[in-house]
């Protein structure tokens, strides 16, 4: 028997039964002793269009029930060498977005203090800002791989600084990012001016619009990215709306012409070798996909993130 | 041809076409000259459980398309003697609930300044607080008929004073209500203590739990209520979750054992003769009823409210 | 083994398998030798609001699969004394409503020529007009029990004489009805003037609005109706929108405040003893109830109609 | 702070977050020291029509998240005087129904050995048979209140003795029931012969068909039942399909004309004073109600069962 | 402030609020002074399989709410140099397809008389025939880019000349098309004989079946098409069922193996430089995609059409 | 008129009407004289995760209604040279999986005895084991093309030998397969160890994981496969979960990163020239795709299988 937590197997309990934790893993009340922890942030009050991401963490956990421990494609076996647990949810204040941001920042500071690498189940994208702030406090500025249909670098939305279209602007302002190691993949759609994508470019970020991704494997791109990032601490923020709505219908700000799941897997698998200090999978909105498949894909991508975390020690 | 706005008829444009305004009425940019105006408040950030009421106004308008001008049951013909229009939506700040409350209060102050009676398409129930404040500023304290599964008189939720479980506490604190003319109909479910319902009773409010409504017509109750309210200015706040989920599945904080649509119609029709200064229909959450029927029922109840507004002049 | 067709039993084939015929009965290519036949009319081009009733017959048949032969409440055992079959669908012209009306009329003339009593799976309510015409040609004018939210006696809709809001006007014009034996149950909602319900009253019809049905059993009403109709040939036309949308969400022109399924069963069971020459169940629109329950209720009501058909001979 | 487990409150964690346990209660690995335990049985392979009840326990738990500790209608406060926990799921064998029955029986024998009163989240109705067997072994034969659209006393289905239509026949054969204290409420629909309902009557059971329940409160019936049962150990088995599909669309073998939620609450609340040794809520099939409301009603009924359990000691 | 209409911005009104017009643009009662106008045709009575396209225009407008004015991929900024408005819906006769065709033809003749370029929100594909007739009357025969799973050149369907499978046959018969400038892209599926695709080829049309589009960018194809069409007036008719159902589930006559959204964008963007005199996006059927994403993609494609309209003057 | 059965055409009966048989073909009570027969197996009790495939055959038939006789892409016209019929469903025992396996084996032995080539509408994948056993008895060991996300070669699931994850292990044990002519295409996801895919390789099977299929046509692969199989009797088993969930959301054990419909068509069309002795399309779960499109795609793939069956004689 392993010294590490294992997902409850399908031969011990039918997959549709048992605890509705991430991958049917044991829970832990604290990140102490946990190498990698799944954390839910049930929030949608930063959303500008369709709501529902508050329900994302519960459905991602529910639909993670088919995940088995071994990654057939990559050979990763994360539960062989890491202590992994479901660390539960952040008790955000659902009536006040700005206070929630503070709650998240404090919560992640505590988690990071134990050396745990957090993998976050969102929740709307606002949450990445306070996480990046906690990351900066722990690791200094980080490299960033940001997969999204949107740049999320608005200065304000409806006059507000805190919203799901602003997290990377805020993180940049607070010095959370290593600007020549920031990558935005999958951007597309409509905006107000070229500035929407060029703002980051002006900071030294590399923006790869969706159109540049069409018709090809992203494995070569990930090689380039790995070369550029090297061993800097790196954060992966994956907005499920980066995918074309065919692949991820259950989200709030849909833009056609996006990535496909083959590319999504290539991106996350292409992070193997990086010094990933954490990651998130955000913007899953269950009411817009009653089949549960968007959440299921989110769960798989979180498992793939777990599979590429650096081995401990 | 009438001097008043008329809904676009089904013989001029198929009901599934034409403008998606309330009852396919003309819009008006201001309440000036409007006797009764439909106003949407697309808000759900005050919700404590399922989201989605931000989409309520759009779907209520869409599903109002079958409404014809004459009320077969009551003989009311509101478009014969009132100028009615769709006044559009309140531009709430979807990232800040407290600011939204201020926006709503100002908006309704302006609407009321024209002598218009507003009928509001919600939106989560937080919105009734700022409306009642505007009502108080215009009319002084008002009588209140509050139909709901919940008392909505919490002092705080998650430490906050502004949330969809608190509007009537706030309104009471601000002196918006005539305490011996407040009626809460349909309350039920679980809570923390008897205080949840008794708080209002202590203020002089009459609380009629759902259980007291089972198995009977509410027409006699409405007679009692009319007798008690007399000609005081009266506000009607109708939370669609007062209905049993069989009748209104599309809402966020569902409690079984509620009212039925027969009683809902009896309540609103039972307001005929009161000096209704406004009303709202709140908590319709479209993602939880893709058939659209919850919104359709909401639209019908709003039409019934229109049908019992006092004639102008 | 019975001399009569029997539904395929659940012990011979799982209920979710086997032929998707009505009640899993055998089909028949002609009505010859058939005492009672189920006929589908897959039509929705007469609908004025939501579409979808074209899919009604298929889903009613699908959801009829749980129906067993014996009526526990009434003791009826229709397959003990009648030859019943699924007679398939009428090949309507889905691009031309007026031609479809002719096709239906001819089709039912043929069916009636064999002495068969047709029970129709709709389809939008336009279909009842040509059926009543065929009934008149066979039986002379008939008594009518019409259960509906709407009177369906419009002279025109959008300038057209043929639409699902007009069948009973047309049938009256063509002398299909015995005017002092016409009953309209469940009418409600909005209209253009009192005339919408009074037109029939002027002809001698009895109109029982939904409001008169609230809070009580309809068994006494059915006694009155049976007394009035006596042994005149009688047709039962049941529009599923007569039910409150809580009970039948899957339909196109929804009106809240309707009948419940207890009353629906009382109405159909209350037809026992009448000389029913046919019946229909119309306006089931599958896309508006993915659970299939509206169709299932329709299937049950059709079975209840079968249960009250006069025994042959 | 209470000596007893309490549901995680909405002021500590938003209701859509936190552990997806029943009522957001703590879990317990064993029934030792637990007065009342919620247990899930994720099973649907005993179902004869629509599948999906295997997912019932997860969704009932998810939708139980709004339940607060105090019962506003009855004044019950179960967490004040009982230790309650979520005992997790029974690891049934989803590929073999007969083995699953044995697993359930053993599982409940263990639970009952601790003096715990189990409240079961189904799952198809087959599960009540092994529970009743365990009850008999612990308590001797028990009184039974069985709320259902179906009698579930088939000798065989498709030649099998184990299926969701047979549990009470099996339980009777094994001497689990006190025959003059068995009540079947809500039966209706179609069958094969009068025997379907009379079989139980012949054993001394009281059968109350749905038709006898229409139009009236069931509180008087429950008084009669309590008088007859006295202080015999009593089991309550509640099949959600007893409710009319308007009130509980998400189930597999739907019969129109059923109970309503007012009656459902009256039945469970009417069990106060009985010596309830356990109860179950079965046949919730999530895929047939994406709103989650059927599961939510199930969760409420389970809470009401908890509210009427005899106080410990 | 622009001299041209602008979409209501997300900083003025939350995107889920405000008028449900196309792109939240102002409406206009006439095409006078309008360079490009969005027009809805709420029709589905020409459909041969699943219904629902009558609801397409309303849902396309609703889901267009996220569209911002600037096209990030192409740099187009249509509201900088054109007067664009929502021109409302054509009042078709929903009970008579043939009359609807006449109504559409007249309506578009009027619109075209103002020099306005119409972009149509369908509606079933029958509508393209009367639009092409109006185009011919205004511009003479036009080049045609027809994107579809189906050739839509049937001589008759069920004996009828007017149906959604016939518009291009009718348009050809009436001399609306420049035969050596007709392109049909995406055709596939089953038929009756090779004639189904060869009929157009015999007229000089170029047919590009879906299979020829698999695995590659369509940008080169669009170059060829532009070269062939030159500056002839050109009409773009885009049937959403050209897309694989993965990308556009909400439509009525689904054929697997279709285009993807990358190709759809390439096709429309590849029309830049053509003398587009109008376009349509047809066959969106909302009931078959409750997420709204099919309509949202339709809205985006209509915006892309707007982006490639020739600048005025 | 053809000597062979033809699908009922859309000009004889609207496609949404008529018999809900596969392709609206005539049924046949026996396989005698039938060259190729569609057979449904309404089973899901072998499923390990989401249920619902018991409803697959009914929905596949329903959604097959648009299929016309001629294959536009390949020129196949199967009804010109084969007698094809819908042979109905296998009466499985839905309460006992092991007995169902025996029933299926016997049923197919009978079908094969007539020289009929069966095309099976599943149903969970357990069913392929008994079919392969019947194939072996008739033809000796067969070549196998197995398209799936999963290898389905588990020795046991939950201690059971019979489950939808085991059929090819069982078939191998029973000598049903020609080991150097077995191909597994599309495998992916998570597992327990490399053994999950290598077990077959050790037997000589060729495993082509999904990742090897990304970004390219599978036509070359099919050429290789045809070369290897030659004229050996060959069986094609197509699990719809081989497709990425974007293309086939309605299934039970979803794995992202799968095949697309272009590849699915290439695979089946690439079987032309093989000596196909039968095929199946399994794991369509209707409740997880209410649009019906997954079933529709399944129906199309079954038609493509029919199109590549060797001509008789
Ligand atoms: Mn984002
Ligand atoms: Mn995004
Ligand atoms: Mn409220
Ligand atoms: Mn409420
Ligand atoms: Mn009608
Ligand atoms: Mn009606
Ligand atoms: Mn039962
Ligand atoms: Mn039952
Ligand atoms: Mn077309
Ligand atoms: Mn098409
Ligand atoms: Mn498989
Ligand atoms: Mn599989």
Image (cartoon, coloured by chain):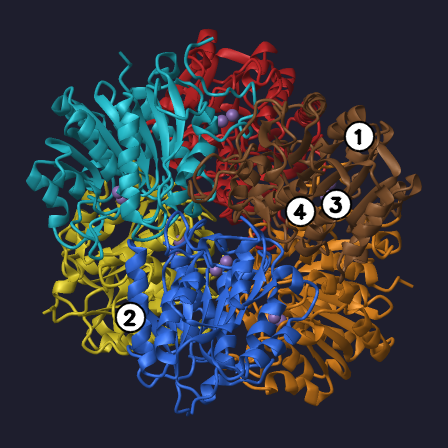
Chain colours: A brown, B red, C yellow, D cyan, E orange, F blue
Local crowd size for mark 2, using a 10 Å CA cut-off: few (<14), some (14–19), many (≥20): some
Chain to which mark 1 belongs: A
Q: Nearer the viewer, mark 1 or mark 2?
A: 2
* Mark 4 to mark 2 CA distance (whole Å): 60 Å
Q: Nearer the viewer, mark 3 or mark 4?
A: 3
Which residue is pictured at 57% across the width and 85% down the height? F75
Alpha-carbon span between mark 3 and mark 2: 52 Å
The residue identified by callout 4 is E20
Horizontal side of D126 relative to B35 (left or right) equals left
Q: Which residue is mark 1?
A: A159
Helix, strand or loop status at disc 3 = loop
Give the spatial CA distance, label 3 vs label 4.
43 Å
Q: Which residue is mark 3?
A: A271
Chain letter of the residue beneath label 2 in the structure image: F
Q: Is residue B96 left or right of residue F56?
A: right
Task: Kindly identify which numbered label has been placed on residue F106.
Answer: 2
The earlier-in-sequence mark between 1 and 3 is 1
x and y percent of residue E135 in the render?
75, 73
């Amino acid at each position: 028997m392993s010294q590490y937590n294992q997902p409850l197997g399908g031969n011990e309990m039918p997959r549709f039964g048992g605890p509705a934790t991430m991958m049917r893993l044991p829970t832990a009340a604290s990140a102490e002793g946990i190498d990698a922890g799944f954390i839910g942030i049930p929030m949608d009050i930063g959303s500008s269009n369709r709501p529902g991401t508050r329900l994302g963490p519960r459905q991602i956990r529910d639909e993670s029930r088919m995940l088995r421990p071994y990654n057939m494609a990559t050979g990763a076996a994360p539960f062989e060498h890491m202590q992994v647990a479901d660390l539960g949810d952040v008790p955000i204040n659902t009536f006040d977005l700005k206070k929630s941001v503070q709650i998240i920042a404090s919560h992640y500071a505590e988690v990071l203090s134990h050396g745990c690498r957090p993998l976050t189940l969102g929740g709307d994208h606002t949450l990445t800002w306070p996480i990046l702030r906690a990351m900066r406090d722990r690791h200094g500025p980080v490299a960033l791989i940001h997969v999204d249909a949107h740049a999320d670098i608005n200065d304000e939305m409806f006059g507000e600084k805190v919203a799901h279209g602003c997290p990377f602007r805020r993180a940049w302002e607070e010095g959370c990012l290593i600007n020549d190691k920031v990558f935005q993949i999958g951007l597309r759609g409509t905006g107000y001016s070229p500035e929407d994508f060029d703002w980051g470019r002006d900071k030294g970020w590399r923006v790869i619009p969706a159109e540049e991704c069409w018709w090809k494997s992203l494995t070569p791109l990930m090689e380039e990215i790995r070369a550029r990032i090297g061993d800097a601490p790196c954060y992966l923020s994956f907005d499920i709306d980066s995918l074309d709505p065919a692949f991820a219908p259950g989200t709030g700000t849909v833009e056609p012409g996006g990535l496909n799941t083959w590319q999504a897997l290539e991106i996350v698998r292409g992070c193997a070798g990086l010094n990933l200090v954490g990651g998130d999978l955000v913007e899953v909105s269950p009411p817009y996909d009653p089949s549960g498949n968007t959440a299921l894909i989110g769960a798989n991508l979180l498992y793939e993130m777990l599979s590429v975390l650096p081995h401990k020690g």
